[in-house]
Amino acid sequence: MWEQRVIAVRYRRWNSDPVERVLAPLGLVLKSGLWYFVALPHPDTSGRGPRTFRAARVDEATGTGERFSRPDDFDLAAYWEEWSREFEAGLYTGTARVLLTPAGRDLLRATCPPALHGALDAAEPRPDGRLHAEVPFESLEQATAQFTQCGPDAEVLEPAELRQRVVERARATVRRYAE
């Protein structure tokens, strides 16, 4: 990377067989205990911007002997911030309409990813003291766990399937403690 050398990698994508790529590495990033590297596709591939790769998915990396010129205007920190924001936004497949007490909002803020904090900040107060929020979620399973942890400090209004799952989880918890 420091010497601006092109590498050939065999990379395992999460959803398919390994692929081979020729890359111009621009930087390394450590996030949540995982290493990522940012690279440009082969320097001969014009018009394609940087890509992000999880380092642990590289099965093999070898130098090609080629050198490349790092773009003068590339800012790794700025790239990573934008990429992370877009990546996290793409994870969320649905939105839950919920009513939260202030304690429920605080619990969600403490346990949910920072990408969701904006939805919690935008929660609208109601006359009964609860807050109406529209909270993105990754999957019904994840959202069920997320809102169940809040107990009575969160009420899911929509989607109906998520509301039903939270009700079922709450009933199962009551049954467990009633035994």
Image: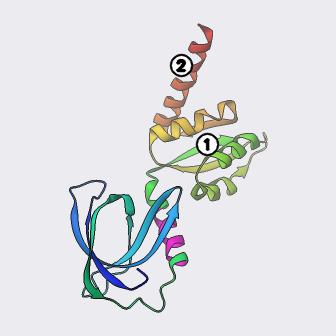
Which circle marks residue 172 in the picture? Answer: 2
Q: Counting residues from the N terminus, which is met first, the one under dot 1 or under dot 2?
A: 1
Residue 87, quarter of picture: bottom left
Give the alpha-carbon distance from disc 1 to disc 2, as whole Å. Answer: 21 Å
**Can residue 79 be spotted in the picture?**
yes
Mark 1 lies on residue: 98
Give whichever of 12, 150 is nearer the camera.
Answer: 12
Quadrant of the snapshot with the C terminus: top right
Q: Is residue 108 above or below residue 61?
A: above
Q: Is residue 58 above or below residue 157?
A: below
Q: Where residue 42 sits: x, y (%)?
A: 27, 82
Callout 2 crowding tier (Cα within 10 Å): few <14, some 14–19, many ≥20: few
- Mark 1: give few (<14), some (14-19) or many (20+) Cα within 10 Å: many
Q: Residue at x 57, y 50 (%)?
A: 135
Q: Nearer the viewer, residue 141 or 18?
A: 18
Q: Quadrant of the N terminus?
A: bottom left
Left/right of residue 6 with respect to residue 124 in the rendered view: left
Is 85 in the magenta?
A: yes
Examine the image and state in which quarter residue 52 appears: bottom left
Residue 83 position within the rendered picture, expressed as x and y whole percent measured from the top left: 47, 70
Q: Which residues are magenta?
A: 78-87
Label 2: state its secondary structure: helix
Using the rendered view, name the quadrant where residue 5 is placed.
bottom left
Residue 63 is situated, as x and y percent measured from the top left of the image, at: 27, 78
Q: Is 151 placed above or below 96 here?
A: above
Residue 123, image x, y percentages: 68, 52
- In this view of the protein, which residue sits in the foreground, 114 or 160? 114
Q: Residue at x 58, y 45 (%)?
A: 97
Q: Are marks 1 and 2 in contact (CB under 8 Å)?
A: no
Chief secondary structure of the magenta span? helix
